[in-house]
Image (tube, grey):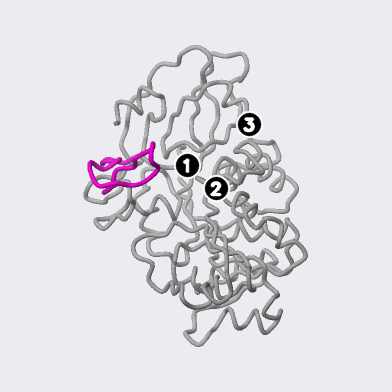
Amino acid sequence: MIDQLIEAGDIGGRTVQIVESGEVECVGYPARELRDAEVRIRTVRSAISSGTEMTFVGRSATNAYLNKHWNEELRIFERGVASMAYPVIIGYRAAGEVIESTSPLVATGTRIYGNWRHTELVTLPASVADAQRLPDELSWDDGVDIAQMGPICVNAAAYGEGEQAAHPAVVFGAGVVGLLTAQIVRASGADPVYVVDRLAARLEIASSLGLVALDASSPQTDVAATVKRTHGSEGIPVAWECTGSTRALHEAIRTVRRHGSVVAVGFYQGDATGLMLGDEFHHNGVRIVCGQIGNVHPSTTWEGLRTRIGQLAVDGQVILGGLPRLTLPVEEAARGFAAIQPPGDVLQVALTYG
């Protein structure tokens, strides 16, 4: 696997990997020579995903690819040899600068965004790099979210099918995905947009973005009852669940109106604890749709998703790099992964390669 990644130009230099013990390491790998019509990019920033990437970390890692076989033809997981094995080299939030080029299409010094791994050096076809130029108006910290994290959230908002326009909307989770999704939902016409979380620090961030923070930390708090008493039983056509908690998914179902929609954005692990499908789901005919990025909305494309998030960021309708983050050198990646497990005061972690 490692040899294949090197040959493909996907990794080089200082690289973050997760080993079988569940620990995180920073190791060095060689970078292969450039071929015709390619560029080599030196990563300036990458950012850790507190969802997908954390499912590979620790002795009790939960990602299905580690213990099941993905049958691409049937599109089901089956028993058998697992689809992935350690060491695992992951990452999909990155931005960097072209330091070598064998194509006149992209000059050295060009700023590029991408969804490559936590690695110092990556090779891309020049045509791909040309299509992923980081707009001058955006920072490196903005850039790490143009390729995939931003599109994840634009895609999630699209699954509201426009029903949120001119209506209140509710987003569960004030992590990065929830905060971005809430801003995009607002940009699509929803008003007001509520953000539900249990962590005071994250709710403060939501409030600073002009979103309506709802504190769910108290066992006595009934989120669905609170918003329905304000807007009526038919007031919320769509809710987005961005935490990966099936208990929160159940609460989102309770929150929407009869025949309303819940967009499931989180990465759900293990058994569905707290999800009671005989309650409001049954009685209100609620529709649950997967809004994850493996399910790109039919109205758009990857290119369209990236264009949309880039424009929203340039226009100031969505804050990307301005969201708080702990920034560490790549050599301290293990500390970064530890800082966001379990979630607390650290919203996200960015790695530098200086």
Secondary structure predominantly adopted by residues drawn in magenta: loop
| Left or right placement of residue 223 versus residue 47 in this view | right
87 falls in the magenta region: yes
Q: Nearer the viewer, residue 61 or 142?
A: 61
Residue at left offset 38%, top offset 20%? 32
| Left or right placement of residue 225 versus residue 39 in this view | right
| Sequence-wise first label, 2 or 1 | 1
Residue at left offset 41%, top offset 25%? 9
Which of the image's four quarters has the N terminus?
A: top left
| Left or right placement of residue 18 versus residue 149 in this view | left
* Distance CA(mark 2)–CA(mark 3): 16 Å
Q: Nearer the viewer, residue 79 or 170?
A: 79
Residue at left offset 37%, top offset 48%? 333
The mark lying in front, picked from 2 and 3, is 2
* Residue type of the residue flagged with mark 3: Arg
The mark lying in front, picked from 1 and 3, is 1
Disc sitting over residue 133 in the figure: 3
Element assignment for label 2? helix
Element assignment for label 3? loop
Disc sitting over residue 92 in the figure: 1
Q: Which portion, as a residue range, is magenta?
A: 66-88
Q: Residues within 10 Å of mark 2 (few under 14, many from 20)?
A: many
* Residue type of the residue flagged with mark 1: Tyr
Q: Nearer the viewer, residue 10 or 277?
A: 277
* Residue type of the residue flagged with mark 2: Met
Residue 117 in the image, given as x and y percentages of width and height: 43, 38
| Sequence-wise first label, 2 or 3 | 3
Residue 50 in the image, given as x and y percentages of width and height: 44, 55
